[in-house]
Image: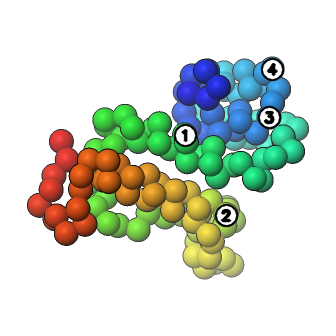
Amino acid sequence: MMDGVEYPTVEHAYQASKTMSGAHREIIRLKETPGQAKRYGKIIHIRSDWEDIKGSIMYDLLEQKFGQDNFRRLLLATDDEQLIEGNNWHDRYWGKCYCDRCNGSGENVLGALIMRVRDEIRRESGYKETDREHKYQ
């Protein structure tokens, strides 16, 4: 959900949040796949405050996604693993690029945000770092 509108995926909502145009947001919402939404998000007029707010928007969307039981269980099953948005298309902001040229370089902001959501879910559920026997249902 973003601004009272339900989107099919986090990618759809994230791309739609790049613009203030209701028409462009609706076009993105109706795209069949996350990839199509992402491609359309690259050609729209980006809101002026985008660089300042994109991280908090992604975090809010990830909280919604991992607030759903099935996704929460999958996330918690990662235990303390470092989560990396690996790619080979040179996205070194959201992930780490593993092409021959980049060799695993990148900020991995998406991985860090997902791990932050995981930590928040643990805190809210009373999980203790030393409690390795704790299992989530």
Q: Amino acid at mark 3?
A: Thr
Question: Going from the N terminus, do you reach mark 4 or mark 2 first?
Answer: 4
Q: Is residue 59 above or below residue 134?
A: above
- Circle 4: residue type: Ala
Mark 3 or mark 1: whose residue is earlier in sequence: 3
The residue carrying mark 1 is 61
Circle 1 — which element? helix
Residue 89 % position (x, y): 67, 61
Q: Report the front residue among 69 and 11.
A: 69
Mark 2 closeness class: few <14, some 14–19, many ≥20 residues within 10 Å:
some
Contact between marks 3 and 1 (CB within 8 A): the answer is no
| Circle 3 SS class | loop
Q: Earlier in the sequence, mark 4 or mark 1?
A: 4
Of the two numbered discs 2 and 1 on the same chain, state the one appearing first in sequence. Answer: 1
Q: Point out which mark residue 19 bears.
A: 3
Asked if the residue under mark 2 is in contact with the one under mark 3, i.e. CB atoms within 8 Å, the reply is: no
Mark 1 residue crowding within 10 angstroms, few (<14) / some (14–19) / many (20+): some
Horizontal placement of 46 versus 137: left or right? right
Nearest-to-viewer mark from 2 and 1: 1
Crowding at mark 4 (Cα within 10 Å: few <14, some 14-19, many 20+) = few
How far apart marks 3 and 1 lie (CA) works out to: 16 Å
Q: CA distance from mark 3 to mark 2?
A: 20 Å
